[in-house]
Amino acid sequence: MKSNCPLLAGAITVVVLGICLASCAKNSSPALEADYSTKIIGHWQGTVGDLKETMSIDGDGTFVCQTHPRGFIANTLSQGVTGTIRGTWKIAGAIITLRITHETKEHLGNSIASSTIAAFTDNELVLKSDRGVTSTFQRVRSL
C-alpha cells in the first residue's frame, strides 16, 4: 500500500497541473477589436458542423483551411479524406470575410464566407455565422 503513494501523488500533481494550465488558457484577456487583424495570424483548430478544421491564417492576407470529416461513419468510411480551401481574408470591425479562391475535395456554393467574431483571446476564437451557427477554434502553437 505504501509503494502506491508516490504514484498516486504523481497522478494528482499531473491532474492539478493540467487543470491550472487549462484555466490559464481560458482566462487570457480578450483581444481588442482594433487588434483582431494582427492577433488572428497563426494556426487554429476547431469544429464546424460535422467537420474538424485546421486553419492557417497568414499575415499576407491569405489562408489555408484543411477539413476532416468527424464521427464514427465519417472516420471509418472516408478513410481520412481531407478537403482543402484556400483564399484571402480580411477583417472589418468584428466581421471576418473569407474569399475562397481554390478548393480541393470540397463543394462550396459560395465563394465568400463571413462570420462575426463573437469572442477572441490569445488562445480561443469564437465565430458566429450569419445563420447563427457558433464555432470555437483553439490556437495551435505548432503544426
Image (spheres, grey):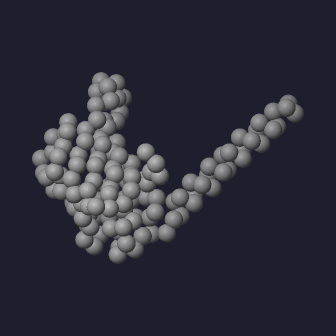
Residue 137: % across, % down: 39, 53
Residue 66: % across, % down: 30, 43
Task: Look at the image and tell me whether residue 53 can be seen.
Answer: yes
Quadrant housing the N terminus: top right
Seen in the picture, residue 3 relative to 33 is either above or below; the reply is above
Task: Look at the image and tell me whether residue 119 can be seen.
Answer: no
Question: Residue at point 49% right, 69% down?
Answer: 29
Of all residues, the one furthest to the right in this rendering is 2
Of all residues, the one furthest to the front in this rendering is 60
Residue 85: % across, % down: 23, 46
| Apparent side of residue 117 relative to residue 21 in the rendered image (left or right) | left
Quarter of the image where one finds residue 104? top left
Seen in the picture, residue 84 relative to 133 is either above or below; the reply is above
Q: How many labels does the image show?
A: 0
Quadrant housing the C terminus: top left
Pick whichever, 90 or 51, lies toward us: 90
Question: Residue at point 34% right, 51% down?
Answer: 56
Pick whichever, 142 or 27, lies toward us: 142
Question: Residue at point 57% right, 58% down?
Answer: 23
Quarter of the image where one finds residue 108? top left
| Apparent side of residue 122 relative to residue 38 in the rendered image (left or right) | right
Residue 12: % across, % down: 72, 44
Question: Residue at point 81% right, 33% down?
Answer: 4
